[in-house]
Image (cartoon, grey):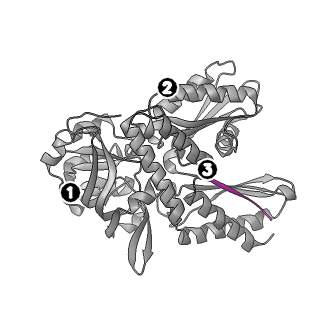
Amino acid sequence: MKTPLSENDVRKLRAGEIVFLSGTLFTARDQATRRLLEKSNAIPKNAAVYHCGPLAKKKNKKWKLVSAGPTTSARMNALLPSLIKKCGVRAIIGKGGVDAKTKAAMRGKCVYLAAVGGVGALYAKQLRVRSVRWLELGEPEALWELDARSFGPLIVAIDARGKSLY
Amino acid sequence: MKFSQVSLLTQKILLEAQTRLPAVVERALRAALKREKSKLARLQLKTILDNVALAKKEKLPICQDTGFLEFFVEAEKDFSLIEKGIRDGVAKATREIPLRPNSVDALTRKPLHANEPIIHFISARAKRARLTLFVKGAGSENQTGIFMLPPTSKKIEEAVILFVKNHAAHACPPVFVGVGIGGNAERALCLAKKALLRENERSRNPANAALEKSLLRKINALGIGVMGLGGLTTALGVRVETAATHTACLPVAVTLNCWALRKASAKLK
């Protein structure tokens, strides 16, 4: 599938399906998610947000990902309903799932894609760094804009109809 | 012993622990793949094993969370020299492997752009001097609990299973479950960590081994499965360590570790 995803695209996905994503992704975990609620135009509408604090290396002024698997989505639970509403997020990629309030906020417009936890080296090979902002939050917490090429496998773990595998 | 030798040894075991999964852990993952029938469990276990092979081949950290760096120093003397060597080795490995700069100020959350190691010193005879590293991701460390049970309680197993039931999905299962029983509160937590570092899968103490076996069976019956998406394998192993406690105390500590049980150890010379 290609990002940005439309509302229609995500409504078609069913819990249990396996997908590979290509196109732009934005990483945002604890600190970046908090900041996105104040600066919602920092990412475009219909974005795919990846719960990931990458391990990256800077060589000749260019960032390269070394290891970039998912982080626990539940830590961001309290912020996610507002994030979906304010930023129009279409897909959340992470691990471990989200709570009932977030699930309700996702209904009809957003899916949760489960990446395999700990698979950092392999996923990093499928992702390139396009830009990075908010590095003052620290490398793991910054807002990384990534170019994905067949990023996966990802599992539709909570679909837009509210069906969940957890 | 020289400062530079300790620094080099630290860098060596950091590279080993971050990029090569212990053989016994890889075997446990393969055994789980053989057992699993669910499509999603199998796909994820295969992806995990592909990642382990790639990390080993290209010397890449298995997981982007290069974790807490916890060192256990067993030595007779030279503690301050060893500590300096470890700190130097951690700083160099952070730049060179590289490792993710994970440390932040606890209250302001300001990034320190570095890794602050946790170092324990244990007295040992000079010929038994060792440096052991335990790499534990935050997702696993966050899933840690301590219960001060009534001393006559028969509910040790129940407490451990309930904890695993509520927390395993967030710790990148299939998990390893470290259980520490006895001592005082912080001793019990150390025992749970020590259990995860133990070499042999089953305790040599028959009572502990029986508890490990029973817990493993009951935990795998929970059906949480790989990454919480269901299946037969919720835990790859359960390890119990015990110590003497106070007659009026029964501390039980549980700490979960993701499938990537990362550790390495070397002789200190």
Marked residue chain, label 3: B
Question: How crowded is the residue under tag 2: few (<14 C-alpha within 10 Å), some, or many (20+)?
Answer: some
Q: Is residue B102 left or right of residue B196?
A: left
The mark that comes first in sequence, 2 or 3, is 3
Q: Is residue A76 left or right of residue B75?
A: left
Q: Is residue B208 left or right of residue B234?
A: right
Report the Cα–Cα distance between label 1 and label 3: 38 Å
Q: Which is more toward the observer, B130 or B119?
A: B130
Q: Name the front one of labels 2 and 3.
A: 3
Q: Which is more toward the observer, B170 or B63?
A: B63
Q: Which residue, given by chain and number where applicable, does mark 3 sit on? A: B23
Q: Is residue B35 above or below residue A79?
A: above
Question: How crowded is the residue under tag 1: few (<14 C-alpha within 10 Å), some, or many (20+)?
Answer: some
Marked residue chain, label 1: A
Q: Quadrant of the C terminus of chain A?
A: top left
Q: Which residue, given by chain and number where applicable, does mark 1 sit on? A: A2
Q: Is residue B75 above or below residue B244?
A: below
- Residue drawn at x 77%, y 57% is B130
Circle 2: element type: loop
